[in-house]
Image (cartoon, rainbow, N blue to C red):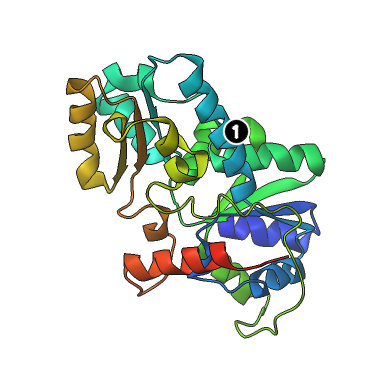
Amino acid sequence: MNETIRLIDLLNKKARLAVILAPSFPIVYEYPQIITKLKKLGFAYVVEVSVGAKKTNEQVLSLLQRNPKSRIITSPCPSFVRMVRTKYPSLLKYLALSADSPMSATAKLVKERYPDHQPVFIGPCIAKKLESSEDRPELNILVLTYKELDEVFTNFNISVNMPTGNDKFDLEAKDTRIYPMDGGLTLTSGVNRILKDEEFRIVSGWRNVEEALIEFQSNPKIRFMDVLFCEGGCVNGPGIISTLPVVDRKKKIINYFNKKTS
């Protein structure tokens, strides 16, 4: 049973569900209309994944500050992690695998705050399905892309032009809403203020990743790499239906970041 059918089945059964919405959502959905639509579907709680991103930042900073000589490669992207495992196993020791991805961190928070509610991640990334099923099966996260969510809306006749309500996120975090852009982790965690320019690298796009890994191996001055596998970051994930160029997708993220939401 694929994820779309599973979610439709759970909603029909009135299952206890909490949706965790990736911070790239403003590219394809309007706020707060998207929350109204998700609540109408039957989700008990709607949580921003940017909440979990704050926990990710804390964990990454702890790793970096614990040892002033530490070298870290961090990425929430399962595709990148698998690339390192298969092609660059010697670099595995540098991966910040002990730090939760924002998705996993948010799912943990949902389980703490809303016991007996299954977390359902909605985002731009197909590879997150692998993180859920292979890396973090104990969290029982159902993962769908925005494309798949639109299929669910269609199945339940949730109108695209539904009037905007006054619904708000049940849990929100404003400071990490730029996380889906390349460099989002570095900027929101303050790594760029802790390290010198020559000590960190921000990398996005699979074509640039291997070159960056080679540089990391040859240049010991680089202490920190912030990697997103899609060009421009998660704003360019394959689960997004949009004709907008990356620069305009980023503008939507920044506009939401600057928006007063509560």
Residue occupying image coordinates x 47% and y 40%: 130
Q: Tag 1: residue type?
A: Pro
Judged from the image, the secondary structure of the residue bearing numbered disc 1 is helix
Report x, y in % for residue 246.
33, 65
In the image, 259 versus 114, the foreground residue is: 259
In the image, 28 versus 256, the foreground residue is: 256
Judge whether residue 258 can be spotted in this image: yes
**Left or right: 220 with respect to 53?**
left
In the image, 253 versus 187, the foreground residue is: 187
Report x, y in % for residue 5.
60, 59
Report x, y in % for residue 238.
38, 58
Count of labels in the image: 1
Residue occupying image coordinates x 55% and y 72%: 29
Q: Would you identify the image quadrant in which residue 166 lies?
A: bottom right
Residue 10 higher or lower than 86, as above or below: below
Q: Would you identify the image quadrant in which residue 56 lies?
A: top right
Residue 192 higher or lower than 121, as above or below: above
In the image, 192 versus 74, the foreground residue is: 192
Mark 1 Cα within 10 Å, few/some/many (few <14, many 20+)? few
Residue occupying image coordinates x 73% and y 43%: 110
Report x, y in % for residue 178.
49, 54
Q: Would you identify the image quadrant in which residue 111 lies?
A: top right
Residue occupying image coordinates x 36% and y 73%: 244
Quadrant of image for the C terminus: bottom right
Judge whether residue 238 can be spotted in this image: no
Label 1 sits on residue: 137
